[in-house]
Amino acid sequence: MKRTGLKRTFALVVASTVIFASCSMDGSEFTDSTVLLKSKDAGRVVKTLEIMRDAEPVLEETIETKEETEPVAVETVETVQTVEEQGNAEIVFDDADLTMYAIAEGGIRAASDIDDIVIGNLELAQEVHVTGISERGMWYRIEIDGETVYVQCSALADELPEAVMEDEEEETEETAAETAAAVETETAVTTETTATTTVVVETEPEPEPEPEPERSINYPSEGTIEYDLFILVNEAREDAGLEPYSWSGTLADAADIRAEEIVELFSHTRPNGEDCFSLSGVWAENIAAGQSSAQEVFDSWMDSDGHRANILDPDYETCGFSMCYEEDSEYGYYWAQEFGY
């Protein structure tokens, strides 16, 4: 920039005395054939040229210094690019160090993906060490037995619910009462035996526990495509040694909504930006498109590890399905399958 300034200064100095002037691009050479001067001003122009030539080393040193500092700018650009690449991750976790408690017997997964296989389950009221929270607030990263795993945020809370705390207090009181009753019984037996060795203490046999009532199973309306799919799913669970699902009207309503939404956006994220778990009672979801029958969509889901894991999850107890048909849409048939407790 300084070199250019001196050239412009030279042009302004000679403008009033030169009939016509030009110079080479580097300003280092001026010839008699290119510069026509009035004789009385020639001396001033020569002095100006000498000043410019004396200034050359300074200008060169300035340029060299600038070139030496440029690698710093290159390093800065590279650092910014690394940050941008990290920001493009699919799911980003903020580090945390929290103690939380399980408020539902949610599934533990090896990855923060709803389609990932459930590798274990939290116990109700279990204390959990949280090491990270996803930016969208959908997943917790936790440590169990030294391993890093993932659970949905809806499965944990900062404090135990009052209902769980009351149950624990009742269990403690019942245990204390049973212990006290056992001590009293032992004391009474010891006293009677000491008074006479012929006393026989008779106790009534403990009543046999009553069998648990059979779990009632609700079904969708017969003759519907939802009924056909429901039967296929429960047959698969029976073959796997699992309890059958019971039909849930709440989850069926959620499935109706989701089947219509995935016509517009085929994703577990809803068109309004919320995830599918924002619907009441939904803990897991399978979706599909293009299959025209219950058997066809069932086979598609069972051929996928993630979808099969939802269907055969031993913890889920209820489900609801729905199919939406849009003639002018890309796939025509859209399916939603919701699971809960």
Image (cartoon, helix red, strand yellow):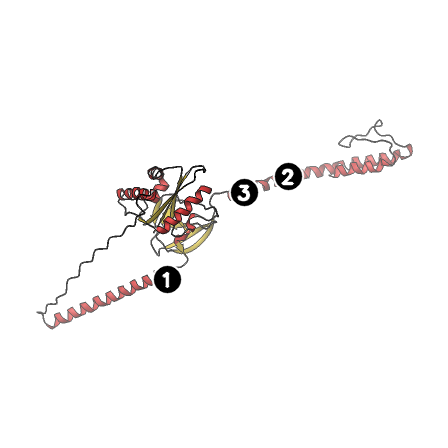
Residue at the extreme right of the image, as rendered: 40
Circle 3 SS class: helix
CB under 8 Å between discs 1 and 3:
no
Closer to the camera in the image, 168 or 255 = 255
| Mark 2 Cα-neighbour bin, 10 Å: few <14, some 14–19, many ≥20 | few
- Quarter that holds the N terminus: top right
Real-space CA distance between mark 1 and mark 3, rounded to the nearest whole angstrom = 44 Å
Q: Is residue 315 visible?
A: no
Residue on which the image places disc 2: 70
Q: Is residue 59 visible?
A: yes
Q: Amino acid at mark 3?
A: Glu
Closer to the camera in the image, 28 or 100 = 100
User: Residue 328 at what x, y percent from top left?
Assistant: 45, 37
- Front: mark 2 or 1: 1
- Front: mark 1 or 3: 1
Q: Which mark is residue 162?
A: 1
Residue at the extreme bottom of the image, as rendered: 195
Real-space CA distance between mark 2 and mark 1, rounded to the nearest whole angstrom = 63 Å
